[in-house]
């Protein structure tokens, strides 16, 4: 059963598996992405390499010089920064669909990331998969649509897809954490006031 009211202390029915301060999100990525290579991480790396190859191919097909490629990369980087709010809005929209009432957004300049969180709203692992993957699916589709509409700017749009996919590493880390703990009945909630996210696991009944 889904834990109804989030508490910081385990109440006998579930255990706190992990608490991460937002400020320490970098170490979460190091621990559960870089040091925990699974097919989830490998698929992210493979998608980035594949998209990166497409990017280079598009530049060469368009006959880009080194200087025009550099300018294109600059525009792609700008495009990436511009779509960050959309990325977070998609996370927020999924939380909203899942019934979250208090959805908050923020950025951490020091840790170089933006976030959308559902304050004190418990989500299951299955729900969290959708929260995590939705921005990648939505923005990759939207930007692919842009390539179709404006093929002459395809280098910039493909570049934005590449940078955005790279930027999804934090979301992929969360997906990998869910995969690593797939045998457990896992839940997560964010405490926006404390700046902490908590993963809970239902304690298995003793037989
Ligand atoms: Zn994200």
Image: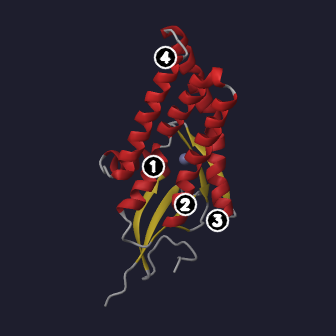
Residue at 40% from the left image edge and 34% from the top image edge: 49
The residue pinned by badge 1 equals 172
Toward the viewer: 87 or 133? 133
Q: CA distance from mark 2 to mark 1?
A: 17 Å
Tell me the quarter of the picture where residue 169 sits: top left
> Dot 2 surroundings within 10 Å: few (below 14), some, or many (20 or more)?
many
Query: Going from the N terminus, do you reach mark 2 or mark 1 first?
Result: 1
Contact between marks 2 and 1 (CB within 8 A): the answer is no
Toward the viewer: 8 or 34? 34
Contact between marks 3 and 1 (CB within 8 A): the answer is no
Q: CA distance from mark 3 to mark 2?
A: 14 Å
The residue pinned by badge 2 equals 190
Q: Does 42 sit left or right of 10 as displayed?
A: left
Name the quadrant of the C terminus. Answer: bottom left
* Secondary structure category for the residue under label 1: helix
The residue pinned by badge 3 equals 98
The residue pinned by badge 4 equals 60
Query: Going from the N terminus, do you reach mark 3 or mark 1 first?
Result: 3
Q: CA distance from mark 2 to mark 4?
A: 45 Å
Contact between marks 4 and 1 (CB within 8 A): the answer is no
Q: Note whether 95 is above or below 9 in the view shown.
A: above
Residue at 39% from the left image edge and 46% from the top image edge: 43
Colouring mode (rainbow / by chain / secondary structure / one colour): secondary structure
Where residue 194 appears, as percent x and y from the top left, is 54, 57
């Amino acid at each position: 059963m889904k834990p109804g009211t989030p508490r910081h202390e385990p109440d006998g029915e579930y255990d706190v598996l992990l608490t991460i301060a937002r400020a320490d999100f970098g170490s979460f990525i190091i621990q559960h992405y870089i040091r925990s290579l699974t097919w989830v991480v490998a698929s992210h790396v493979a998608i980035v390499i594949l998209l990166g190859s497409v990017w280079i191919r598009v530049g060469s097909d368009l006959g880009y010089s080194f200087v025009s490629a550099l300018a294109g990369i600059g525009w792609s980087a700008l495009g990436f920064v511009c779509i960050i709010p959309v990325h977070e809005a998609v996370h927020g929209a999924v939380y909203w669909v899942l019934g979250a009432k208090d959805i908050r957004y923020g950025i951490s300049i020091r840790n170089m990331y933006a976030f959308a969180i559902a304050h004190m709203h418990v989500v299951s692992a299955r729900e969290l998969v959708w929260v995590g993957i939705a921005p990648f699916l939505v923005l990759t589709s939207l930007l692919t649509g842009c390539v179709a509409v404006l093929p002459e700017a395809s280098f910039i749009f493909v570049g934005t897809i590449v940078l955005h996919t790279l930027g999804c590493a934090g979301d992929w880390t969360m997906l990998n954490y869910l995969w690593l703990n797939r045998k457990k009945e896992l839940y997560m909630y964010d405490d926006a006031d404390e700046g902490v996210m908590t993963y809970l696991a239902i304690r298995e009944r003793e037989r």
